[in-house]
Every structure is written in structure tokens, then in C-alpha cells.
Amino acid sequence: MVEILGRDPRSLYLADMTSCVKCGDPAQVVMSFDYASRTVWLRDLLVGYDRFAEMPFCEMHANRLVVPVGWALSDDHNLSPPLFLAHGVA
Ligand SMILES: [Zn+2]
């Protein structure tokens, strides 16, 4: 079977069809977690996400995310350089 990013392509949802699970606004961030290591990860929603293993959030809800006591948050979103920079915006 062909895999995309190590995932079954049937489980992938495309980024441009994705809404925040909290408010329904367009999602820019994806959250995943692992009970065994008590870790939560945030990453940019660039291409798509695995609907069985990840949850999409808008920027506001990603920034408001608080993990349970004893869990670690690995926040890797907004680390990708933007494709375009705004010029002349005051
Ligand atoms: Zn939201």
C-alpha cells in the first residue's frame, strides 16, 4: 500500500478542507498526543492531517491549549518560514 508521510492515505484529510474542532474556523495547527509518554504535540497544518490520530485547531485555540498536569507540550507550530512576507503593512 502507498503511504504518505508514513500514513495510510485513506486516513488523511486535506488542509484546505479542515476546520477547528473547537470553533469551526479554518484550522492552521494540528494536535496529536501519546498517553504512554504523556506528550502533546502541536505542528503546522501544511498539507493534511490524520483524522484518526490528530485534531485540527485554529491558531487561537492552539495557543490556548493547556496540557494536563504531568504532561509535556512540544509546540512546533509556526516554526516553518512563511512563503510570503507582508511589506508596507503598518
Ligand atoms: Zn478554534
Image: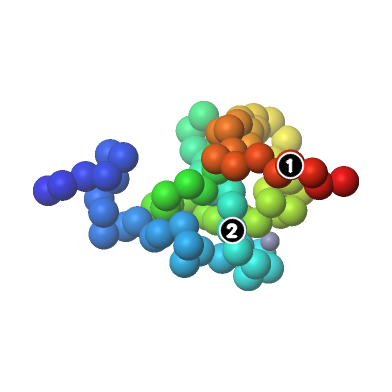
Q: Is residue 5 visible?
A: yes
In this figure, which residue is indicated by the disc labeled 2? Answer: 27
Q: Residues within 10 Å of mark 2 (few under 14, many from 20)?
A: many
* Drawn side of residue 59 relative to residue 55, left or right: right
Per the model, the C-alpha gap separating discs 1 and 2 is 25 Å
Residue at coordinates 28% horizontally, 39% vertically from top-left? 6
Q: Is mark 2 within 8 Å of ligand 1?
A: yes
Q: The residue under label 2 is which amino acid type?
A: Ala
Vertical relation: 60 (above or below) 37: below
Q: Are marks 1 and 2 in contact (CB under 8 Å)?
A: no
Q: Position of residue 61 (x, y in %)?
A: 71, 54
Q: The residue under label 1 is which amino acid type?
A: His
Q: Position of residue 34 (x, y in %)?
A: 49, 38
Taking the view exactly as shown, the residue that stands out farthest to the bottom is 24
* Drawn side of residue 73 relative to residue 30, left or right: right
In this figure, which residue is indicated by the disc labeled 1? Answer: 87
Vertical relation: 23 (above or below) 84: below
Residue closer to the observer: 31 or 36: 31
Q: Is mark 1 within 8 Å of ligand 1?
A: no
* Drawn side of residue 58 relative to residue 54, left or right: right
Q: Position of residue 42 (x, y in %)?
A: 58, 40
Taking the view exactly as shown, the residue that stands out farthest to the left is 1
Lower sequence index among marks 1 and 2:
2
Residue closer to the observer: 26 or 53: 26
Q: Is residue 76 visible?
A: no
Q: How many marks?
A: 2
